[in-house]
Amino acid sequence: MTSQGIMIEESYHDSKSILMAEGEMMQVFLNIFKNAQDNFKEKKIQNPLIMIETSDTKEGIMIEISDNGGGIKEDLLSKIFDPYFSTKDEKNGTGLGLYMSKTIIEKHHEGLFNVSNKDKGACFTITLKT
C-alpha cells in the first residue's frame, strides 16, 4: 500500500486481543507516522518506507513501526521522549508528540514504548499486555 508517496509494508503475526483506548492509540500511531513523513521530506529520502509488524509476546503483543529515514542520531535517542525536546524547528515541532505518546502507552495502557535505530531508520516498539 502507498500513502502520500510513502510505501507501507504490513506484517501482522499477532493473535491476541488487547483492551485499549482506541482514540489514544490512534494518536500514538499518527504521531509516529507524521514524524516519519516529516523526516522523509526533510532528508529528501528516495523511496520512503514505513514497516508495521506485530507479533505475540508471552504477556501480550508487540508492535514495531520502523522506517528507512536514516534513523535518529545516537546522542538524541535518550532525549527523544523528553517533554519539549524536538529535532524540528520551532514552527514545526513542539516536542510533545512523542512525550505524550510514551505517556499514553506507559501510564494509560501499562505498556512499554521504546525507540532504537534499526537497519536504515528509526524503529518504535510498543509492547502491550493482554
Image (cartoon, helix red, strand yellow):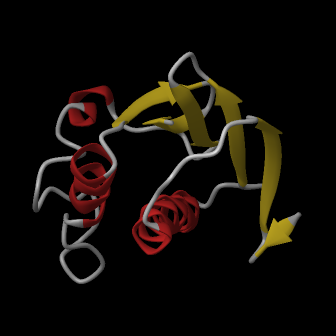
Q: Position of residue 34 (x, y in %)?
A: 50, 69
Direction right: furthest residue: 1
Instruction: Name which residue lies at 64% across and 45% down.
Output: 17
Direction bottom: furthest residue: 91
Q: Nearer the viewer, residue 45 or 31?
A: 31
Instruction: Name which residue lies at 23% across and 36% down.
Output: 76
Instruction: Name which residue lies at 17% across and 40% down.
Output: 79
Quarter of the image containing the N terminus? bottom right
Count of numbered badges drawn on the protein: 0
Q: Position of residue 27 (x, y in %)?
A: 43, 70
In the depicted structure, whether residue 64 falls above or below residue 59: below
In the depicted structure, whether residue 2 falls above or below residue 11: below
Q: Position of residue 60 (x, y in %)?
A: 54, 30
Q: Indicate the quadrant where residue 112 lies.
A: top left
Instruction: Name which residue lies at 39% across and 38% down.
Output: 72
Q: Nearer the viewer, residue 92 or 60?
A: 60
Q: Indicate the quadrant where residue 54 lies.
A: top right
Q: Nearer the viewer, residue 81 or 118?
A: 81
Q: Position of residue 128 (x, y in %)?
A: 46, 37
In the depicted structure, whether residue 78 falls above or below residue 81: above
Report the side of 49 relative to 29 (left or right).
Answer: right
Report the side of 58 relative to 113 (left or right).
Answer: right
Q: Nearer the viewer, residue 121 or 16?
A: 16
